[in-house]
Amino acid sequence: MTGPVVRVDTTGPVPPYEQIRAQLAALIATGQLTEGERLPTVRQLATDLGLAPGTVARAYRELETAKLIHTRRGAGTRVAALPSEPQQPDPAQLARLARDFASAARALGADTEAILTAVRKALE
């Protein structure tokens, strides 16, 4: 992974593992990380971000559960092939993402209308 960079705000309301998971999932979904591309090792990404290896390992486990990445001994962690059929979003995951976004937006001082406007623009 030489292109996009993952950033973590340890002072924000969203746990660091979730920030890593969400950013990598978005990079994969948008094609910025492509099938077969190798991700940094858990230790390397943890060192780069100044986090505990367990934090990065949890993010990687969740990405593996979502079938976005796969890890093989000796081959490292790589981006998995995206499913050819669109998947129905998990309502619980959507709710968690919405909650995390709303919390982060509120921490910036945004009111409900500003948050809804931002979401509408993002969907356009």
Image: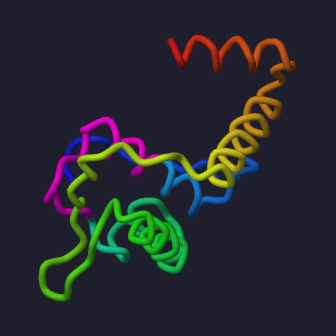
* Left or right: where 8 falls relative to 40: right
Which range is magenta? Answer: 23-39
87 or 105, nearer to the observer: 87
Q: Is residue 38 magenta?
A: yes
Farthest residue toward the bottom?
Answer: 73
Q: Is residue 49 above or below residue 4?
A: below
Which percent across, then down, holds residue 75? Answer: 13, 79
Position in image of residue 118 (x %, y %): 65, 16
Is 54 situated left or right of 97 in this image? left
Q: Residue at x 13, y 86 (%)?
A: 74
Check the image and report above or below for 25 versus 114. Answer: below
**Can you tell which quarter of the image residue 15 is in?**
bottom right
x 81%, y 20%: residue? 110
On whether residue 106 falls in the magenta region, the answer is no
Q: Which image quarter holds the N terminus? A: bottom left
Left or right, residue 29 beside residue 13: left
Q: Which residue is painted at 86% across and 19% down in the image?
A: 111
Residue 90 drawn at (x, y percent): 58, 52
Location of residue 66 by image quarter = bottom left
Drawn side of residue 32 relative to residue 75, left or right: right
The spot of residue 80 in percent (x, y) is 23, 61
Residue appearing at x 46%, y 46% in the figure = 23
Up-down: is 23 above or below 106? below
